[in-house]
Amino acid sequence: MELKIGSALVSVYEKEGLESLLATLKTLGVELISTGGTWDYISGLGYQATKVEELSGYPSILGGRVKTLHPSIFGGILARRAHKTDQEQLLAHGIRTIDLIIVDLYPFEQALASGASEEELIEKIDIGGVSLIRAAAKNFNDVVIISSREQYQSLEELLKKQEGKLSLEQRRNFAKEAFVRTANYDATIAGYFTTDTFAPTLQPSRVTPLRYGENPHQRGEFRGDLSKEFSQLHGKELSYNNLLDLEAGIGLLAEFKTPTFVVIKHGTPCGVASAETPLAAWEKAYLSDTESVFGGIIVTNCPIDLAIAQAMNALFFEVLIAPSYTPEALPVLEQKKNRILLQRNASELAPTLARTVLGGLLVQERDTQNLKSAEWKSARQLPERMSDIEFANRVVKHCKSNAIAVVKDGQLIGVGAGQTSRVDAVRQAIAKAHRFGFELQGSVLASDAFFPFPDSIEFAAAEGIACFVEPGGSLKDAEVIAAADRLGVALLFTGVRHFKH
């Protein structure tokens, strides 16, 4: 069932992008109704528009807090066109129907992000706009709702293509997006009023289609605002897997303050290194695993200068995200047209993580626990390489369980991740280190969970690994400590497990 748009109520905070849509509506002969500043804007473009006050018989009051909240407005939106009693009541009270509602809400989210005062924030809580959106979305059978300026272009294209008409399916889709918009808007406001960061996670209102999901035969999309996280400077569109790897890399990078590079492949760190200079950090991260870095995701807290760009350029990698790029560096990296270059914004990691499971949602706090090494329990002798121990413990926290990280001189030299046996993870990490020519003598090993048996320490110590860090808490801790004593290696218990599934 198609709906021919005959009238539109326009009430928006931001006017950007509205001019072209208004021109199309006027070309189609749509009657415009508007409020306050939006009416001034429409009139300034030379278009005629009826003021809401003319329909309601009441002026805008309370400093603009009440403009559209009136039966003459909401009756025209909520009235069912095929409902006899509704139509009789409209006629009795002289209420006209409204076919299209265009709303852009007060920017509470932006005000909150800017650090506005509570008084300013309260005035950015939209009341009438949310009510208009919900009313129009409820009556999608007879009304079209545009709940964000990001939808202006798609609406305009539909109106031009379909001569001012929209199908029931199209109206229903706009209604779905409208309810998601108001749900998230209210969730943001609710989040401001609570100190509990462990709050429900809702679907964001912005949806970005992706080329596909994890595999080409799967559909995929991103629901959220990527522009808050970074700006894309160059390259093809990001993929589903790119975004998963970026999340993994950004989370790991947050553990470090010194110049650090992280390379992620299939959600697992394959190269991590810190150094006094950014170039040295990159070179060490690359040498961590010169095979796996191929096609990887590179994340850094260092500005990319010409020397780093030249060092990286011969390498095939999917994505590089950095805080900035020098003017000389960008042209070098842009030589590969599909290479994705991102500039990260000053955003913070969300305090909670969520994933769908069995038709529901699992939500947990982000793992931010990192006890100082001074709080760890030294089960056998104090190690000399405490900085490497802390480095390894930060890295293993971001590897899939069962996980092992082997580190030496601020560089990840071996990783075992996603193994069903902890000793297999140890074997994998050591085999990696051997394959790339690293000397294990004097290196340190971190485990994301306790060693259930002494076998892992026995195997690793035989390879020259001198220090081990693990949570402790196994029934066989005494046997593990005894093995460390017998082998003459250092062993520390952190008391904190870092499973990652």
Image (spheres, helix red, strand yellow):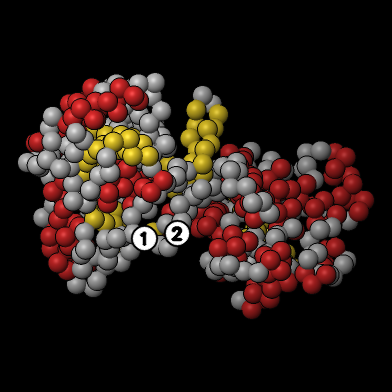
Residue 105 place in picture, x, y as percent: 64, 60
Q: Residues within 10 Å of mark 1 (few under 14, many from 20)?
A: many
Residue occupying the point 78% across, 38% down: 82
Secondary structure beneath disc 2?
A: loop
Amino acid type at circle 1 is: Arg
Task: Indicate which disc residue 58 carries.
Answer: none
Tell me the quarter of the picture where residue 245 sits: top left
In the rendered structure, the answer to whether residue 17 lies left or right of residue 210 reads right
Residue located beneath label 1 in the image: 344
> Is residue 237 visible from the viewing direction of this image?
yes
Locate residue 175 relative to residue 72 in the image: left or right: left
Residue ranking furthest to the left: 437
Where is residue 50? Give x, y as percent: 75, 68
Q: Is residue 193 above or below residue 142?
A: below
Which residue does the image show at 33% across and 55% down from the upper left?
Answer: 256
Q: For mark 2, does the 10 Å Cα neighbourhood hold few (<14), some (14 to 19), or many (20 or more) residues? A: few
**Residue positioned most to the right:** 92
Residue indicated by mark 2: 347
Looking at the figure, which quarter contains the C terminus?
top left
For badge 2, the amino acid type reads Ser
Front one among 309 and 257: 257
Give whichever of 129, 226 is nearer the camera.
Answer: 226
Whole-number angstrom distance, CA of label 1 to CA of label 2: 8 Å
